[in-house]
């Protein structure tokens, strides 16, 4: 069959994904890249030339859309995915949104409208939902091994301060320097909802201060946050995410009426309430679709989570029912992301709880179409929130000069995150 043509927006995270996934993929191939940073765009051109591949490298998203692509992978700034997703859907292009679907509720409403009107496949690439242990967790939960989940816990902590110069390039208004502490929440919330099928209906937020090790990088947000949620079955959930001084953590727990499941790196443990009470399970195989394909050449580390998430997206495009079941659609993506946006409103409002709307209902969307509250400095002042609970700090330009100096000592390559 003819391969689906893929365009990528963003040559850092996007090329990281493409180099691990799309250089030798049975059902799709990379045909275009859009990158506005000239240094990286030139590196992409050189890379594909060395590979003997004909790939368009441009700096204009409309040129990318006009190049004949069937799919666009959005790997641009994480708080700018929605406008590009909407433009692509309006042009009849399937969308794979790598992280954070929206930065405001108004965008969320517009995105739902665009997906429904286009008839194209929108998928959220929350790869933590597709880790082997999370898939095993979902299988055990769906089998009824612990009964109804009534308390969920997710933790994702990744101290990015040592590589902040690579991530932000010393740009004062880079999204990482001002988005809310709760914004990057779907690595912790997503696997909980994906495993149980639950959705949050109410959320509160808590934030730790802006720590010195982040302030000296130019970050203006609180350094970590917690979202506490009420679920649609009356249960509760807790999410912790941010730049905490600790080795990388991604761990999850589901407490049910008959037992519990814990998922840590590479394994799960199921606790059933019986005479023995405890039943340990190590890493298990999970049901991949026939559309998932490990590239023929080893272009770098390829995780099952990347293969699985993108594979179910492709499966959905091609009409396989497993893609419909396991690909994360726009409504599920918003269930995972909106608690972060609204938890930050709670933080600013001294802990006041906020409803998490179900935007599957157009009538509910109508209540939020003008809700543009966010921390983006480009937002009109009447909708702009402070970047942390104590306000928006002033940062001397010398801080960003120092970050840029560190960046200048690095040889940037396509795929560098």
Image (cartoon, rainbow, N blue to C red):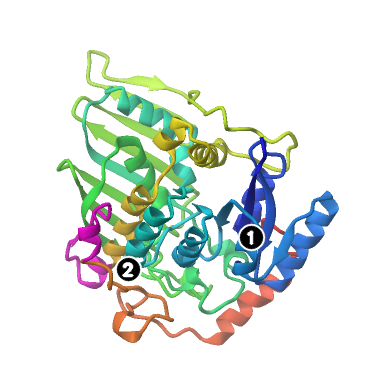
- Measured Cα–Cα span from mark 1 to mark 2: 28 Å
At x 77%, y 67%, the residue is 42
**Other residues around mark 2 within 10 Å, as few (<14) / some (14–19) / many (≥20):** some
Which residue corresponds to mark 1? 12
The stretch in magenta equals 345-366
Is residue 240 placed above or below 266 in the rendered structure? below
Q: Picture quarter containing residue 14?
A: bottom right
The one of 204 and 354 positioned closer to us in this rendering:
354
Q: Position of residue 115 (x, y in %)?
A: 40, 55
* Label of residue 307 in the image: none
Q: What kind of element bears circle 1?
A: loop
At x 42%, y 28%, the residue is 136
Q: Residue furthest left?
A: 234
Residue 359 magenta-highlighted:
yes
Is residue 305 placed above or below 53 in the rendered structure? above
Q: Are marks 1 and 2 in contact (CB under 8 Å)?
A: no
The one of 91 and 366 positioned closer to us in this rendering:
91
Q: Can you say which quadrant of the picture contains the N terminus?
A: top right
Q: Picture quarter containing residue 264?
A: top left
Q: Can you say which quadrant of the picture contains the C terminus?
A: bottom right
Say left or right for 164 vs 320: right
Say left or right for 179 vs 72: left
Say left or right for 404 vs 221: right
Q: Position of residue 197 (x, y in %)?
A: 29, 38
Residue 89 magenta-highlighted:
no
Decide if residue 155 is in sight here.
no
**Other residues around mark 1 within 10 Å, as few (<14) / some (14–19) / many (≥20):** many
Which residue corresponds to mark 2? 106
At x 65%, y 76%, the residue is 404
Which mark sits nearer the N-terminus, 1 or 2?
1
Q: What kind of element bears circle 2?
A: helix
């Amino acid at each position: 069959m003819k391969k689906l043509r893929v365009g990528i927006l963003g040559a850092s995270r996007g090329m990281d994904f493409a180099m691990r996934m799309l250089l030798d993929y049975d059902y799709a191939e990379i045909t275009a890249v859009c990158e506005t940073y000239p240094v990286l765009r030139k590196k992409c051109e050189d890379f594909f030339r060395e590979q003997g591949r004909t790939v368009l490298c441009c700096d204009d998203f409309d040129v990318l859309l006009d190049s004949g692509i069937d799919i666009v992978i959005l790997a641009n700034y994480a708080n700018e995915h929605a406008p590009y997703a909407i433009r692509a859907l309006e042009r009849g292009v399937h969308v794979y949104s790598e992280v954070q679907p929206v930065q405001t509720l108004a965008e969320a409403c517009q995105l739902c409208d665009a997906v429904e009107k286009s008839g194209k496949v929108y998928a959220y690439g929350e790869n933590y939902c597709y880790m082997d242990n999370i898939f095993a967790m979902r299988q055990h939960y769906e089998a009824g091994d612990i009964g109804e989940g009534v308390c969920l816990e997710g933790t994702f902590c990744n101290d990015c301060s040592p590589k902040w110069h690579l991530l932000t390039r010393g740009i004062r208004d880079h999204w990482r320097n001002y988005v809310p502490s709760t914004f990057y929440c779907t690595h912790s919330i997503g696997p909980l909802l994906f495993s149980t099928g639950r959705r949050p209906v109410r959320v509160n937020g808590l934030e730790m201060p802006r720590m010195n090790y982040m302030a000296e990088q130019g970050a203006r947000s609180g350094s970590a946050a917690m979202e506490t949620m009420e679920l649609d079955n009356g249960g509760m959930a807790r999410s912790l995410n941010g730049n905490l001084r600790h080795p990388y953590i991604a761990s999850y727990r589901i407490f049910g009426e008959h037992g519990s499941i814990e998922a840590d790196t590479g394994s799960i443990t199921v606790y059933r309430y019986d005479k023995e009470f405890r039943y340990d399970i190590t890493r298990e195989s999970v049901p991949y679709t026939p559309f998932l394909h490990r590239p023929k050449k080893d272009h770098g580390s390829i995780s099952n989570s990347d293969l699985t998430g993108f594979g179910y997206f492709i499966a959905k495009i091609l009409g396989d029912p497993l893609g419909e079941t396991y690909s994360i659609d726009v409504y599920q993506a918003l269930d995972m992301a909106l608690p972060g946006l609204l938890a930050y409103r709670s933080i600013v409002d001294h802990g006041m709880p906020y409803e998490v709307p179900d935007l599957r209902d157009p009538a509910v969307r109508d209540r939020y179409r003008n809700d543009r509250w966010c921390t983006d400095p480009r937002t009109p002042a009447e909708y702009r929130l402070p970047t942390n609970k104590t306000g928006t700090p002033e940062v001397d330009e010398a801080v960003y000069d120092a970050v840029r100096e560190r960046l200048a000592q690095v040889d940037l390559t396509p795929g560098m995150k």
